[in-house]
Image (cartoon, rainbow, N blue to C red):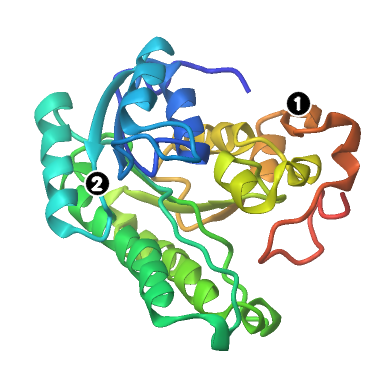
Amino acid sequence: MKNTGKLKGKTLFITGASRGIGKAIALKAARDGANIVIAAKTADPHPKLPGTIYTAAEEIERAGGKALPCIVDVRDERQVQQAVEAAVAKFGGIDIVINNASAISLTPTLETDMKRYDLMQNINTRGTFLVSKTCLPYLLKSDNPHILNLSPPLNMKPHWFANHTAYTIAKYGMSMCVLGMAEEFRSQGVAVNALWPRTTIHTAAIEMLSGSESAKYARKPEIMADAAYAIICRDAREYTGNFFMDDEVLLDVGVRDFSKYACSPENMHNLQLDIFLDDEGPFAKL
């Protein structure tokens, strides 16, 4: 998935961009010469996870972009507002929002304490709504504005709720923001879409939780970065209200070799499907 230069000079506000998928998207856009607002909490090194907003900023600028690291907890309205104001002051506006920040706990009801429930609701659903709402006055001034939420397609089949009701509610809240905002701002030309991975994605955080062995059955964050890039380079007035799958987006733009995205290319036909996905689509039977 080659860079086209379409994002040169565009400003992206990306939550959770200090590592993982968020940083991968930031680096992809940076290669076009984009401006990246790194809106994340990690200002000091984590004892087990690499990367801060400042090391991410260094990588973005080495890749050819301009970076603005901002300490942002998406639950905090004041911090979000300050980061948006700083972005506009530095870059003149905001063109694209990537709602990537998320909290996860795949626990059944009786094992989900309310502190964890509130964390997921406040970061996933409320944080997505807050960041989108705060950026929208500036998106409405952009010539090709996009909001992209990293959230799953809406599926009301009970088994997607049964094992982790709280997490499903929180992630589907992000997806419902897509459903509502896409229609609300359709006539004003703001594209609001969702993107979700076909398979599990291996990041440092996943390795910390699941161990390095899980990489054998996962793809790299770069597949999500390439898919996100393809989406936000499209005409916002023609592509809105969609629930995109990463590999289907890339198939649509001509990518045929997916082995490069597998952490273990020799094992690419045994990849683990991500949750929230039925056994459908061109890559379902991996």
Tag count: 2
Closer to the camera, 105 or 201? 105
Name the residue rendered at 67%, 81% in the picture.
157
Closer to the camera, 203 or 254? 203
The percent position of residue 54, horizontal first and vertical second, equals: 31, 26
Distance in Å between CA atoms under marks 1 and 2: 33 Å
Around disc 2, counting alpha carbons within 10 Å, would you say few (fewer than 14), some (14 to 19), or many (20 or more)?
many
Residue matched to label 2: 72
Pick out the residue farthest to the front: 47
Name the residue rendered at 49%, 70% in the picture.
172
Q: Earlier in the sequence, mark 1 or mark 2?
A: 2
The percent position of residue 71, horizontal first and vertical second, equals: 23, 41
Residue matched to label 1: 260
Instruction: Identify the secondary structure beneath mark 2.
Output: loop
Name the residue rendered at 51%, 63% in the picture.
104
Give the image quarter of residue 201.
top right
Instruction: Identify the secondary structure beneath mark 1.
Output: helix
The percent position of residue 87, horizontal first and vertical second, equals: 17, 33
Name the residue rendered at 18%, 40% in the picture.
141
Quarter of the picture holding the N terminus? top right
Report the side of 15 relative to 224 (left or right).
left
Q: Is residue 192 shown above or below 44?
A: below
Q: Is residue 233 visible?
A: no
